[in-house]
């Protein structure tokens, strides 16, 4: 479809076992139906399980998709083990050098996407630094977007869990 149609497939909570939508997604991506796949949290259930073999299998399963279109991600609560180390090591998102794949933004056509790590608010055993880094980055990103608003049609925010206390 290309960027003029701006078509993405959004995925959440897809495990390595019984991922029923995966064959259809693989087929449709390879037919060129999507510009990107956006996966919002909870990969493989859990990537670190069985000495990370579950994560290895999940990555093999998404390879036929990620080889054709950008596979954009943001972490969920199932990625938090060992301070998100499996997630950080397996994905490379825009500006990963600065944000360690935990939060980032990108433009696709006339849309500005912002992916944040909602888990930074719930796993405080890793300290407050991840939360403050993300906050400072978000303020700068929003300031930069304000300059581009004449070109952007929409701004979309992504995060895994809108939890309530």
Image (cartoon, rainbow, N blue to C red):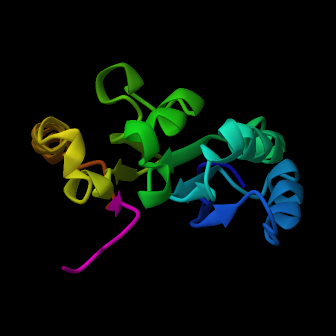
Q: Would you say 87 lies left or right of 57 here? A: left
Residue 41 visible? yes
Residue 149 visible? no
Q: Is residue 72 above or below residue 140?
A: below
Which residue occupies the extreme top position in the image?
97
Between 48 and 61, the one lying in front of the other is 48
Which residue occupies the extreme bottom position in the image?
164
Between 75 and 21, the one lying in front of the other is 75
Q: Main secondary structure of the magenta part?
A: loop
Location of residue 51 (image quadrant): top right
Which quarter of the rendering shows the N terminus?
bottom right
Q: Residue at x 14, y 47 (%)?
A: 146
Q: Residue at x 36, y 69 (%)?
A: 161
**What range of the chain is rendered magenta?**
156-165
Q: Position of residue 78 (x, y in %)?
A: 49, 57
Q: Position of residue 48 (x, y in %)?
A: 60, 43
Q: Is residue 158 magenta?
A: yes
């Amino acid at each position: 479809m290309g960027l003029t149609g701006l078509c993405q497939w959004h995925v959440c909570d897809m495990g390595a076992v019984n991922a029923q939508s995966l064959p259809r997604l693989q087929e449709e991506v390879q037919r060129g139906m999507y510009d990107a796949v956006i996966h919002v949290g909870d990969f493989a259930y859990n990537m670190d399980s069985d000495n990370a073999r579950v994560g290895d299998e999940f990555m093999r399963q998404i390879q036929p998709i990620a080889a054709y279109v950008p596979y954009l991600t943001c972490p969920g609560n199932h990625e938090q083990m060992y301070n998100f180390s499996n997630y950080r090591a397996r994905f490379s998102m825009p500006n990963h050098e600065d944000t360690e794949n935990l939060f980032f933004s990108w433009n696709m056509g006339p849309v500005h996407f912002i992916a944040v790590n909602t888990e930074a608010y719930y796993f405080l055993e890793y300290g407050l630094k991840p939360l403050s880094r993300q906050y400072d980055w978000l303020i700068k990103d929003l300031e930069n977007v304000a300059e581009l608003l004449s070109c952007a049609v929409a701004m979309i925010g992504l995060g895994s869990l809108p939890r309530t206390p």
